[in-house]
Image (cartoon, helix red, strand yellow):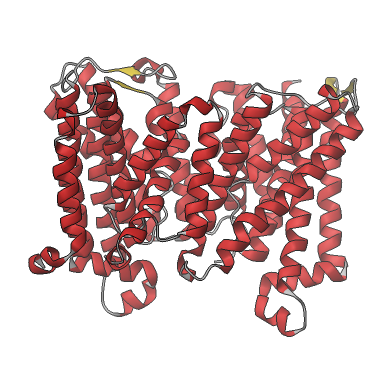
Amino acid sequence: MTAIQILIDGFAISALYALGATGFTLIFGVSGVLNLSHGALMVTAAVVAWAASSELGLGSYAGAAAGIVVCTALTLATYGVVVRPIDKSRAIPPEEKEIFILTGTLLWGIMIQEFIAYLFTSNAKTVMPIVEGVVTIAGVRTPWNQVFTAVVCWAVIGLLWLLVNRTRTGKVLLAASMNPRGVTLLGFELSQIYVAIWLIYGVLAGIAGVLLGQFLGVSSYSVGPLTASAFSIVVLGGLGSVSGSLIAAYVVGYLETLTAYLVSPAYRTIPALLLLVAVMYVRPQGLLGRR
Amino acid sequence: MLAKTLRNPLFWLCLIGLALTSVLPLWVSGYILGLLTVAYYFGVFSMAWDLLFGFAGEVNFGPTFLIGLGAYTAGILNGHGIGIPLCLLAGTVAAVIGGLVLALPALRVRGPYFGLTTVVAVLILQNLIVVFADTTGGEIGLTVPDVISIDAATNYWIALGFMGVSGLVLYAIAVSPVGLILQASGQDPVEAGALGFNVAKHKLAAFCVSAVFSGLAGALFVFYMGTASVGTLIDVSVGVQVIIGAVLGGRRTIVGGVLGAVFLIAAGELLRPLGSLSTFVVSAAALAVILFVPAGLLGILTRQGRHA
């Protein structure tokens, strides 16, 4: 019985990890930016969804929509206020842009985190679930919401795959990730491509954040751990590789669930961290990464 | 090199700064001295970090791993009745050993990968401290039986002296030929290697030096505070503060880290009436500096800072 429970719980949490990390890896793959305010964006989506649905009484659908919209707007602001100015700055030498973007987005994330704590306190909030009730799967009572989370995560990842591989926009994005200068020579505006990719990233982070808020609940304290877990999943999978981060999300998700059930919830994150260090020693570019 | 140092206005500025700050205990209250003592230790953390980033070009997101190793080793040993000097030594050695283990992947990977390894090291250390709560005090924190002194002025002078010596040694390394090789390896490792310099060896050495000062500063800090806890010493957010201090003060300047740390501690204290918004304002100010004055505070004060 426990085995099936681990299978089901692990599947849902891993799907959520996968979706949470997808936008992060997409941004890195296309523009080489590691956005350390990632966790803050997801928490914003969840907290806004909570405030709109529970506090303002708008219901779960309007709440989720509000969370996603605000998160997308904030993600675009992250690009416009922090990433783009650093990228364009003449005062920062090119080889140091990376550390400036890392430090800048980190500070931005802290600002969001503190602002959320100021507006809504740092107490944990659980977003009103879109579907209620429980279902029995192979003898294990599972909340419908958990099934819903896994389905939505995979549907969104599937849609993203279609968008990238089957549409013209997607192909331009893909081309931009491989050769930014080549794409501009073909007459595409690189800055528009970046705005598009940040827009997609915002929607992905928003959906992941709202689902996370329904599934596990969040507080302003979740900002750091969420960024760290997205970062480690993406590195484990190989920076820039979406399929790599999907696999890594399932490895980490199941490892954590197994530890929580079989050892103790207190040790939940330790094996995944040790695995990550081991991978860094043996295969620094990650499971499916290119060097 | 000595003649060059004597001609550098930055050197005299620092000397005057040290002289002025060393007589502060005659004028200001114990409360301000306490704040500055903490700021000086953070200044050492930032300077040690800057040697690694500003010169070797490695983004160490886990300065608190080294600081924490030094602090907790010293604190735990002291709890077993070992005297302060030996504890300080043990803490420093522990940080160097930890630094070597952490730096091994640094020889093979660069940039974000290395950055991540260092963050993960912090998270693992944090988890271990909570798991082995019997020895480490866990989430409540470790109480250390001995303190260096209970006199605010004595503690202040120790911190100031330690910061002065650390700054001098780190700065000397940074402007020495070794520092130049480090800088070259940081900017273009392939070319530096082609010129015949062992990039990996120099970076490893830089990591060890950084670990010596981080570990020793962490150990001293424990004996100043009388306690050690994950939240004040090891947490990723503490590491962020160290990094922001160094970048704010001016990267590649070493001494800039002190300015940044004092600014952060002072700003945090002055803005305390704002309550939970104070961190918001400090972060926003730091972000503004990064966006508009990327050379940092010292970069505005002196042009030498950028080439130091």
| Left or right of residue A86, residue A49 in this image | right
Report the front residue among A264 and A181. Answer: A181
B60 lies above or below B236: below
Q: Residue furthest left?
A: B3
**Can residue A58 be seen here?**
yes
B32 lies above or below B199: above
| Left or right of residue A98, residue B34 in this image | left
Choose top left, top right, bottom left or bottom right for residue A30: bottom right
Q: Residue furthest front?
A: B27
B81 lies above or below B214: above
| Left or right of residue B146, residue B198 in this image | right
Q: Residue furthest bottom?
A: A185
Q: Residue at x 62, y 28 (%)?
A: A118
Q: Residue at x 85, y 35 (%)?
A: A64
Report the front residue among A100 and A10. Answer: A100
Choose top left, top right, bottom left or bottom right for residue A42: top right
**What is the count of numbered marks?**
0
Q: x, y (%) of residue B307?
A: 29, 68
Q: x, y (%) of residue A91?
A: 47, 68
Q: x, y (%) of residue B20?
A: 17, 42
Report the front residue among B11 and B143. Answer: B11
Q: x, y (%) of residue A68?
A: 81, 42
| Left or right of residue A223, residue B41 in this image | left
Q: Residue at x 32, y 49 (%)?
A: B257
Identify the image quadrant of the N terminus of chain B.
bottom left
Q: Residue at x 89, y 29 (%)?
A: A60
**Can residue B100 be seen here?**
no
A76 lies above or below A165: above
Identify the image quadrant of the C terminus of chain B.
bottom left
